Every structure is written in structure tokens, then in C-alpha cells.
Amino acid sequence: MNQQPTATGTGEADDIGAAIAALADRFGHAGRIAFEAHAVAPLVELRVGGASARVALNGAQLLGWQPAGEHEVIWVSPDSAPTPGKSIRGGTPVCWPWFGADTSGFGRPAHGFVRGVPWDVAWSRATAAESAIALRYRTTPETTALWPHDAEALLTVSLTADTLTLSLTTTNTGISPFSLTQALHTYFAVSDIAGARVDGLDGCGYIDAVGAWTRHRQQGAVTFAGEVDRIYFDPPGDIVIDDGAGGHRIHINASGSRSAVVWNPWIDKSARLGDMGADGYTRMLCVETANAADDAIALAPGAAHTLTARYHVTRSR
């Protein structure tokens, strides 16, 4: 396991500098993969062919992606302050090893326990066409008090000039089987939520979390005129966010998944969250590649499962 010092938010500049230097020496590639200080833990920036992506080691959270010749695709709230033990509002928080609210009765955090903790760098690579890095998290005696299983999560982030791929591989390293739900909870930037829509889910069944967890079937595109929080089942290979006035389409291709979540908190939920900003909900929507609800994954000892989301952008006009 590749260990490195991490920033603690206590002003330990020497430790932060040493951590970044060690990471750069072991995993950096000149002009392609670089490390820098970022709030509570180092951040890695990937570059290739005019494209860039930024990933915080705290929570293995994607914080930015800009394909070559395009605007920023990922939304991050300017009102969300990095805090130890908590993810930033926006980007791609990793929900693992459960998705959604805790139903165990043990007071566990929603969406698992890896979003606000440091991950280790497992490996990096840079070729003529790709820059990539893999971040790893292993359960500990402390986490088994929350979730009594031994497991490893490996998030691989791969960047080309026009495509970003996130792959989350879970391996059961223990002696007993377990079941997990999870999600790559990506916040996509849109010019105006009123004119945005999600294509590709027509005919899919879904659970409406806003509507008392009732089940429905999608008719046409998903549009937004209020809070939307839905788990869709058996989505197609290509889900598309049409940004409307923004003139671009964000394509989401998934594998290892039979569910997808579409979410926008709208006005009242944004106010309750407290870190969305006054009009943040108008500039974002989430399409999450997931194993959620009925789409739970069972893993025997030694078995592994990979959840993958691949993103690219095309122009709608």
C-alpha cells in the first residue's frame, strides 16, 4: 500500500510540502501528471492533448474536467469549503460501500465513509494519448465498526484529449461475502437548468425519491421544474445531458451498472444543504453512474466488481 503524508488543515506546511514532493517523485510525469497543495490533502492534475482533469486525494474526488477545446464540464460549488472528513459539494464524490441514507440504525453517514478521507496513490501512467492515475482505499479496523467487512476500492481516472473515464473496482479481501451499493455522484455544469434535459431514459422504470419512493416509468426526456431525485433501472448504454442554450451534449456511458441516478435539489433542498449557493441549483445537475437500490452487488471472498463511467462532449449546434 503506497502511504503518503496528508495535509490535516492545521497549517503544517512542511508536512504538506514533503507529501507533495514524495508524490511528485514517485508518481509525477513532467507536463502530464503533477501534484499540488489543496486544502486538507494533496491534489493531482492530469493533462494530455489540451485536456485537463483535477482529482483531490481527499475522497478520491474529481474536481474538474475540461476536454480539449471545451469549457469546464464539472460543477463545483463556490460556497463549499474543504473540510477534513467531508467531501466538497460538486465534482464526483465516491459513494461507497453504500449509496443513500443509512438504514442500519447504527448512525452511519449517508453515502458511505470514503468521501472525506485520504486515499493512497496506487500507480500512475502517461502515454502519448492518455494520462491516468489510480487511487486506493482499504478498510481499517475503525471502518469495520461501521461496516463489518474487509475490502479494497480502487478508483482509476483516465484522461484523453476528449474523454474522461472513471472506474471504481471493489475487491472483497475478507473471508465472508458482502453486498454493496455505490455511485460515482458526478455534478455536471449546465448553463441553465430550466433549458437542460436528460435524454436516453425514455421507457425506463424509476423510483421517485421525492414522491415517497413510488415507482414510475419515464416518458420522454427528463426535464426540470422542481426537485428531481430518481433512481432509474436498466438505462441504455448512452445517457445524454443536453445543455440547451449551452449548445453542448454530455454523453455518459456506463458499464458494471444497471441503475442511474438523476438529481437536482432545486430551491428548498438547496437552502437546507447550505453549501449550494443562492442559485447553484440552476447551474448543475447530477447523472450518477450507480449500483443503487435493486442493483446491489454481491461479492464472494476474493471476487471483484468494476463500475465504470465514461464521459465525452459533443456539440448540439
Image (cartoon, rainbow, N blue to C red):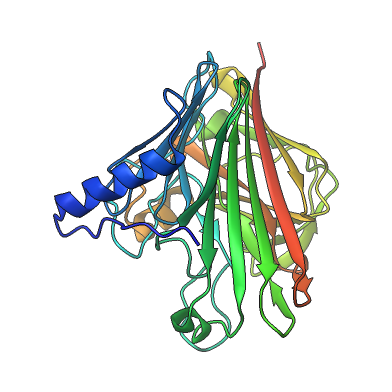
Q: Is residue 291 visible?
A: yes
Q: Position of residue 250 (x, y in %)?
A: 64, 29
Q: Quadrant of residue 67?
A: top right
Q: Quadrant of the C terminus?
A: top right
Q: Exactly how many numbered labels are in the figure?
A: 0
Q: Residue at point 40% right, 63% down?
A: 117
Q: Position of residue 29 (x, y in %)?
A: 45, 30
176 sits to left or right of 96: right
Question: In front here: 86 or 144?
Answer: 144
- Residue at x-position 54% and y-position 46%: 123
Q: Out of 128 and 212, give the one closest to the viewer.
A: 128
Task: Name the one closer to the observer, 32 or 180.
Answer: 32
- The foreground one among 220 and 41 is 41
Query: Residue drawn at (34%, 65%), measured in percent from left and top?
Result: 85
Task: Report the residue at 46% width, 58% height from top.
Answer: 2
Tell me if residue 99 can be seen: no
**Above or below for 47 versus 27:** above
